[in-house]
Image (cartoon, rainbow, N blue to C red):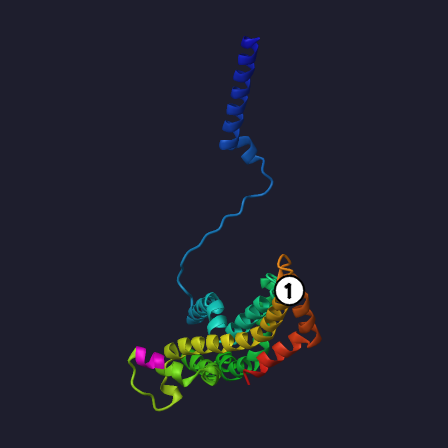
Amino acid sequence: MRNKACRRHIVWILLIGVAGLILSGPCPAFAQSQAFPLPSIKIGVGEAKDTGEVSVLIQILFLLTILSLAPAILIMMTSFTRLIVVFSFLRHAMGTQSMPPNQILIGLALFLTFFIMTPVWQNIRENALDPYMDKKISQSRAIDEALKPVRKFMFKQTREKDLALFMNLAKTPKPKNTEEIPTTVLLPAYMISELKTAFQIGFLLYMPFLVIDMVVSSVLLSMGMMMLPPMMLSLPLKLLLFVLVDGWHLVVGSMVKSFY
């Protein structure tokens, strides 16, 4: 019996080895009988026939660079930061843990950002993108024209105190007007101004829900119901209050109006 088992093992090992050899090296007869050729991809750098091809390649490279920086631009230079921070504060204030989900909050903040930034982007298209595509202005001039409405939007939301902080940190001379303030100084000042504003709005959102938590906790403590978690009673009350006052309408409307 042992000899038969050993023979079976040896036969299986030989069969596996033969199958491995067949799979590791393609059979010439099978290669010749293929009905369609396998595709191949070649990447190289060749000589351009005219200057137009070089210009198109530079435009494609510039576009890919902009797309790679798009998430950072969307977060740092638009209203997205304030919106997503306030929505996160609202969810924690209501105590709903992960409801609404992160995808819903990010999507809502993203589309509200598109709505708020639409006038700015229209200005960029009219004064920078369309003239550049029509070859009326150069690429550097288009970038300068595109930055003007964005800088105007950021200056409107940035506090002078935050601008002065980064101007002192950068050790730049006192500017005569806003045009002399570099964008590298404006960006971090705008970010901390947005964070401060978002935290202020978050504090105001916390107050009514905090009052409900304190009232429910006091009532349960006075009734001697210490084993009942206050969250089980306060959460439905907070949701009821938020629905009755049409909370999403008030919050979103106030957030959008805060940028105008």
Q: Is residue 168 magenta?
A: yes
Which is more toward the observer, 61 or 121?
121
Residue 172 visible in the shown view: yes
Residue at (45% x, 78% y) in the render: 193
Residue 25 visible in the shown view: no
Residue at (43% x, 71% y) in the render: 55
Vertical comparison of 120 with 102: above or below: below
Label 1: which secondary element: helix
* Quadrant, the C terminus: bottom right
Neighbourhood count class around disc 1 (C-alpha, 10 Å): few under 14, some 14–19, many 20 upward:
some
As shown in the figure, which amino acid type bears the numbered disc 1?
A: Leu
Which is more toward the observer, 18 or 27?
18
Q: Left or right of 5: which side holds 180? A: left
Which is more toward the observer, 54 or 169?
169
Q: Which residue is mark 1?
A: 220
Query: x, y (%) of residue 257?
Result: 58, 83
Single out the residue that lies furthest toward the bottom.
176
Query: x, y (%) of residue 137?
Result: 45, 83
Query: x, y (%) of residue 88?
Result: 55, 68
The quadrant in which residue 108 appears is bottom right
Q: Is residue 181 magenta?
A: no
Region in magenta:
165-169
Q: Left or right of 248: which side holds 159? A: left
Which is more toward the observer, 52 or 43?
43
Residue at (31% x, 81% y) in the render: 168
* Quadrant, the N terminus: top right
Magenta region, main secondary structure: helix
Vertical comparison of 84 with 13: above or below: below
The quadrant in which residue 84 appears is bottom right
Query: x, y (%) of residue 219?
Result: 64, 67
Residue at (58% x, 35% y) in the render: 33
